[in-house]
Amino acid sequence: MMNETLKSYKSDNKGSAMITGLVVSTVLMVLCLSLLLIAYSLFLSTANSTSDLPNREMLFSAAEALEHELLDFSMEYDADLLLTDPTGHDFWQYIDNTIWKGFELVPGTENKYTQQVNVGYWMYYDPLDTSGYHNDLEKCSKYFNITSIGSVKIVVQLYWELPKGFEGDASKRENKNGTLLNAIYRMYDNKGNLLVKTEKKYKYSISQSSGGSNGGNNGGNSSFVTTTVGKDETIPFVNNSFSDITVHFICHSNYSSGCTCEINFYNNTNTVITDFSIIIKTNNTITSHGRCNYNLLYTENGINTYLVTPKEYQYLQPGYNRGFFSYNGSEDCLWIPQLLKINDYENNLYSNNTTTTIKWNRIGEEIVNPGGGN
């Protein structure tokens, strides 16, 4: 009887050990499977991130190429006189010629402007607007295909916003300072699935500098080619000995057939002035003609700088001297008198003007959902 009982206990111990072993094995198996699952998830995450990197690099490269056309150029004005040549900067010109259009004075107000809607203008975006027009991002957006590379396509969405706290005359250049241009760059595969996107923001900056880009004895900045129509200025000669000498500069168009430019002198000194000259910058090519000799000093960026001197006996008589300098050309033209010299006294005719520079600057960059999404 005793032997049978001991045998029974021994049999029970073997069963318990077996069960314990099965439980431990099961737990270890579950733990190993869990670790394998975690490792596989990490592998997939890393693989997705790695495969997404070329897409991001391709998108950012395309975006950078486009924004170079916007950021690498600035427009300069002397008052309303354009000093820079925008030729070749098509994207910059498109933006500048398309935003801020269709504004009109609100009836019954003196200085409140609103933008016309439903007439084809590029409307500004304002999420707080309640009209149903300016708070609709789709209505305020323009889309452009940048490029198609293999099986992917890059599309940029552009929309612009008024400067913060904008009020006043929409036609005045200075009131547009701080205009925002938003760009969302998206990359799609050939099935239309969004792969990656990024958003950038640009600010319209208007700055002014005194001293003038045209002044100076070296001829100043000559990076302009443009048309001057209806320009009529009287420029005094600033010198104690010749305070009564003024230069009357006229340049106007000949009804689409070219231009006429002339410089007249007012000599109120009651003396004949024989020793004088003037330096002029122009996009025209001229030869000696009339009462003047034209000596080409140098050419830079398509702009000719001439030293103009009177021919023999063609002096500044007391009173009004009209047509001392004149030009009639078949092409549009720009003439800017730079430096007037009288008996060794020099006057930088445009040394005190103010140059306005307009430029776009990137003010921030945010990567939006680089792994795809909306």
Image (cartoon, rainbow, N blue to C red):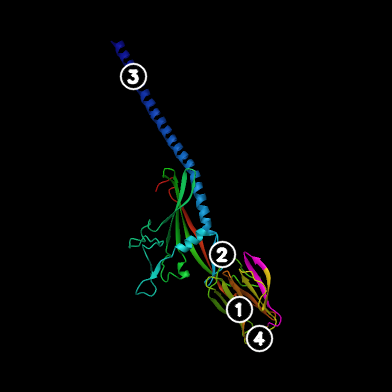
- Amino acid type, callout 3: Gly
Kind of residue at badge 2: Asp
Dot 3 falls on a residue whose secondary structure is helix
Q: Is residue 199 above or below residue 269?
A: above
Secondary structure of the magenta portion, mostly? strand
- The image quadrant where one finds the N terminus is top left
Tell me the crowding category of disc 4: few under 14, some 14 to 19, or many 20 or more residues within 10 angstroms, Cα based: some
Q: Please tell me whether residue 301 belongs to the stretch shown in magenta.
A: yes
Q: Which residue is mark 2?
A: 85
Mark 1 vs mark 3, CA separation in Å:
119 Å
Q: Quadrant of residue 220?
A: bottom right
Q: Which SS class for mark 4?
A: loop
Which residue has dot 1 on it? Answer: 263
Q: Earlier in the sequence, mark 3 or mark 4?
A: 3
Residue stretch in magenta: 298-314
**What's the residue at 50%, 50% (across, down)?**
60
131 vs 1: above or below = below
**Real-space CA distance between mark 1 and mark 4, rounded to the nearest whole angstrom:** 15 Å
Q: Quadrant of residue 171?
A: bottom left
Q: Residue at x 29, y 13 (%)?
A: 5
Q: Amino acid at mark 1?
A: Ile
Residue furthest out toward the right: 312
Mark 1 or mark 3, which is nearer to you?
Answer: 1
Q: CA distance from mark 2 to mark 1?
A: 25 Å
Which residue in the protein does label 3 denote?
Answer: 15
Q: Secondary structure at mark 2?
A: loop
Label 4 or label 2, whichever lies nearer to me, is 4
- At label 4, the amino acid type is Gln
Q: Which residue is mark 4?
A: 317
Question: Position of 295 compared to 124: left or right?
Answer: right
